[in-house]
Amino acid sequence: MTNTSAVRPQADRAAVAHAVLSALAAVRDPELDRPVTELGFVAHCTVTETGVARVRLRLPTYFCAPNFAFLMVADADDAVRGVPEVTGADVQLVDHFAADVINAGVAARSGFVASFADEAAGELDELRADFLRKAVLAGADRVSRAMVAAGTDPSRLADLTLGDAPAGPDTDRLRARRTELGLPAADTDPLLVDATTGAAVEAAELRTYLGRARLTRVSQEANTGVCIGMLRARYGNEVTT
């Protein structure tokens, strides 16, 4: 059992804080599909003498959607509590109009509906799944475009498998998002699949599918640029992304 009363030296606390930041790197903005650490959303991360991790999250605007914010704060809280050396988590959203409600709801583990009793229509599982489907589409475009640029005939994409895709971060990311959704993600599975059903994309559907994938990827990357720019405008030199 962890001794929560022991006073930890500064070097130990710094090592635990590093472990906490590593854990937070697995937490993503659901819409942008980028880690909150890369986006500059982690404003503060320290560990107290008794091993409690204090994390402060910030967003590009005061009015960012509460449902997105709730997901990120809840995921960050789970990630921090999962670090073995941490004895407690104090994860809070700051500078946001709904911060008090979100922080209280996440701390109490009461869920989104209970936190926003008269305003929320439902929990956020389907919202998370919707963004994962968009991430699969955007990932399919990234991988496919790289393959075509390297000489693959575009008309053959519907016949290829994930194992035919070049090894690298984009393929790994696509495979990971498909796995999160429960879609087929083995080397022998189709390179292009319907992001809802997991069915292979047929040759007759290829042009429409690739067009939608490209639009999704461009929209995702444009939103990422806007959010990073707004965060920089809001916090200036404090942002190091």
Image: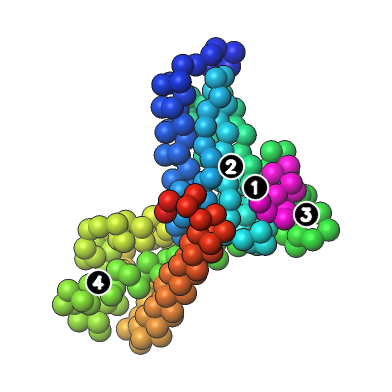
* Part of the protein shown in magenta: 94-104
Q: Disc 1 and disc 3: Cα gap in Å?
A: 18 Å
Residue extending farthest to the right is 118
**Please, what secondary structure does the residue beneath circle 1 have?**
loop
Q: How many labels does the image show?
A: 4
Q: Disc 4 and disc 3: Cα gap in Å?
A: 43 Å
Circles 1 and 2: CB atoms closer than 8 Å = yes
The structure residue drawn at horizontal position 33% and vertical position 70%, both measured from the top left corner, is 142
The residue lying toward the viewer, choosing from 167 and 47, is 47
Name the residue tied to disc 1: 94
Q: Earlier in the sequence, mark 1 or mark 2?
A: 2
Instruction: Tell me the number on the disc at residue 56.
Output: 2
Task: Give percent across and percent down for residue 174.
Answer: 36, 61
Q: Is residue 63 visible?
A: yes
Q: Residues within 10 Å of mark 4 (few under 14, many from 20)?
A: some
Name the residue tied to disc 4: 146
Q: Which of marks 1 and 4 is nearer the N terminus?
A: 1
Name the residue tied to disc 3: 116
